Amino acid sequence: MGSEHPGTAQSLNYLGELYQAMSEYAKAEPLLQEALRIRQKALGSEHPDTATSLSNLALYQDMGEYAKAEPLYQEALKICRKVLGPEHPNTATGLDNLALLEFDLDRIDEASPCPSSVCGRINNPFEDILIHLRTTAFGVLKHLSPV
């Protein structure tokens, strides 16, 4: 496995996610950027793993840099819809990511959790539970937020 191999990108992604979880964004960002670069080159710009890298690089949301995160989430969702279809769990996750970003941006009227047309068809019970919990929490926060 070489430095341009998709497996190398996966390892960089894991390490970047670890640093992100530790709030060490300065260490996470270059790793996630390199993982994205490798995946785009090795797999193409419309591969599901490339979409995953785009979403992971949207760590900017955690840093409060929403303008950087939004186009990454949008591009990841576009890829998922095109390549995986509107009913795939990764597409649902992309919709959920954008909804949470809209909430962070106080654009609550524009935000919506994963629609039932997508989430209702996911066959993984753990994914169903996660989406249900996020949707419920999103609804509660939406009603509690100041107008």
Image: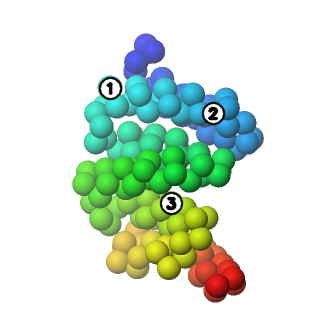
Amino acid identity at mark 1:
Ala
Residue plotted at (48% across, 62% down): 98
* Among numbered discs 3 and 1, the one appearing first in the sequence: 1
Image mark for residue 42: 1
**Looking at the image, is 141 positioned above or below residue 55?**
below
Name the residue at 50% across, 31% down: 33
**Residue 102 image point, x, y percent:** 53, 67
Label 2 or label 1, whichever lies nearer to me, is 2
Scheme of colours in the image: rainbow
Using residue 38 as the reference point, say whether residue 28 is left or right of it: right
Q: CA distance from mark 2 to mark 3?
A: 19 Å
Question: Can residue 84 be seen by looking at this rendering?
Answer: no
Q: Is residue 84 above or below residue 143?
A: above
Q: Disc 3 marks which residue?
A: 97
Q: Nearer the viewer, mark 3 or mark 1?
A: 3
Residue that badge 2 annotates: 28
Tell me which numbered mark, 2 or 3, is placed earlier along the sequence.
2
Residue extending farthest to the top is: 2
How far separated are the C-alphas under marks 2 and 1? Answer: 21 Å
